[in-house]
Image (tube, helix red, strand yellow):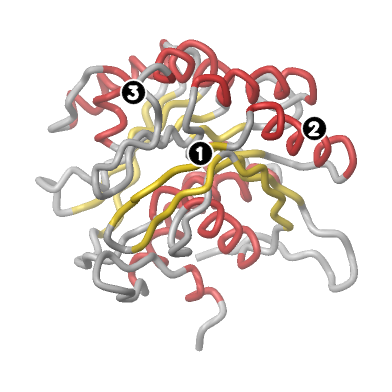
């Protein structure tokens, strides 16, 4: 695959920001985002939204960060360091989402603004543990998705957000249309959970044109952090100035290789592995 151009040693690289929660097991959340950003040659900045108590078997606790602290992390980074793109992950509460939307308007993050925003609408863990409060769904639909340059739900998240259960091409298109109608500039409906397909079919829609990307489905139980890795790879590509379709092509290649070289960890699901980038 074609990689992003690195900065010469000693020169400041492209910067990006992840606005997300932690994973104490190191497989998802800001750990996965920063790992991909570093390996893609991008300097990753972070605004932590929540701290999870988590291992490979699931999430047993969540501690949320005060909304004003989340907003403060974003403001101080953007006004000093500067970033080329941002992404969101686990946001936990409606108050945190509202604080992010407000500070995004202040510092120029979001669709039709200087800094593109990838919204990965993390609603539940891969083990089914709820990671977004029920009351926060309205803030997600009505405030965050409308400022997204691209929104990137998996099929479980699509069902929660739109009420559409994706089972085939037609329902995948219907879901993309609904997400775009909520205000996102681009809607990406990921097909990694569409187990009836021998491929991993992703569908990108901008209100006029559908772009379909199929990659081979890697047969492994170790795919923890795949969604975070895809979204952060897209964020890196957008920070480099790539278009949304080209950023998706880069990210799809990146996450496919990361899944191919995933590894077992603990007693549950192991993480995807972007270290393929530097391995022999």
Above or below: residue 171 compared with residue 58: above
Measure how far apart labels 2 and 3 are at the Cα level: 31 Å
Element at label 2: helix
Measure how far apart labels 1 and 3 are at the Cα level: 15 Å
- For disc 2, the marked residue is 75
- For disc 3, the marked residue is 176
* Cβ–Cβ under 8 Å for marks 1 and 3: no
The residue closer to the viewer here, 192 or 121, is: 121
Left-right relation of 188 to 20 = left
Q: Which mark is residue 245?
A: 1
Q: Position of residue 265 (x, y in %)?
A: 33, 74
Q: Residue furthest left?
A: 196
Q: Position of residue 253 (x, y in %)?
A: 44, 58
- Which one is earlier in the sequence, the residue at label 1 or at label 2? 2
Element at label 1: helix
The residue shown at (62%, 63%) is: 40
Q: Residue furthest bottom?
A: 280
* Cβ–Cβ under 8 Å for marks 2 and 3: no
Point out the frontmost of discs 1 and 2: 2
The residue shown at (81%, 41%) is: 77
Using a 10 Å C-alpha cutoff, classify the residue at mark 1 as few (fewer than 14 neighbours), some (14 to 19) or many (20 or more). some
Left-right relation of 141 to 236 = left
Point out the frontmost of discs 1 and 3: 3
Task: Name the image quarter holding residue 53.
Answer: bottom left
């Amino acid at each position: 695959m074609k990689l992003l151009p690195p900065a010469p040693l000693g020169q400041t690289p492209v910067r990006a920001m992840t606005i997300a929660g932690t994973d104490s097991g190191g497989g998802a959340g800001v750990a996965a985002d920063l790992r991909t950003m570093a390996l893609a040659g991008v300097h990753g900045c972070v605004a932590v939204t929540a701290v999870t108590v988590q291992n490979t078997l699931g999430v047993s606790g969540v501690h949320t960060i005060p909304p004003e602290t989340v907003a403060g992390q974003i403001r101080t980074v953007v006004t000093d360091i500067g970033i080329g793109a941002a992404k969101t992950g686990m946001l936990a509460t409606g108050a945190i989402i509202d604080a992010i939307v407000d500070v995004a308007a202040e510092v120029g993050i979001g669709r039709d603004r200087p800094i593109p925003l990838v919204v990965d609408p993390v609603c539940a863990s891969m083990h089914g543990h709820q990671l977004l409060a029920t009351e926060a769904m309205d803030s997600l639909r009505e405030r965050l998705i409308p400022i997204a340059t691209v929104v990137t739900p998996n099929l479980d998240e699509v069902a929660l957000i739109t009420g559409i259960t994706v089972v085939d091409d037609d329902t995948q298109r219907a879901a993309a249309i609904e997400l775009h109608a909520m205000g996102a500039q681009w809607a990406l409906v990921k097909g990694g959970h569409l187990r009836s397909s021998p491929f991993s079919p992703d569908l990108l829609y901008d209100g006029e044109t559908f772009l379909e990307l199929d990659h081979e489905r890697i047969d492994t139980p170790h795919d923890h952090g795949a969604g975070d890795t895809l979204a952060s790879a897209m964020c890196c590509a957008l920070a480099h100035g790539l278009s949304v379709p080209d950023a998706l092509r880069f990210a799809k290649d990146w996450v496919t290789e990361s899944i191919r070289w995933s590894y077992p960890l603990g007693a549950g699901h192991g993480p995807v592995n972007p270290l393929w980038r530097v391995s022999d």
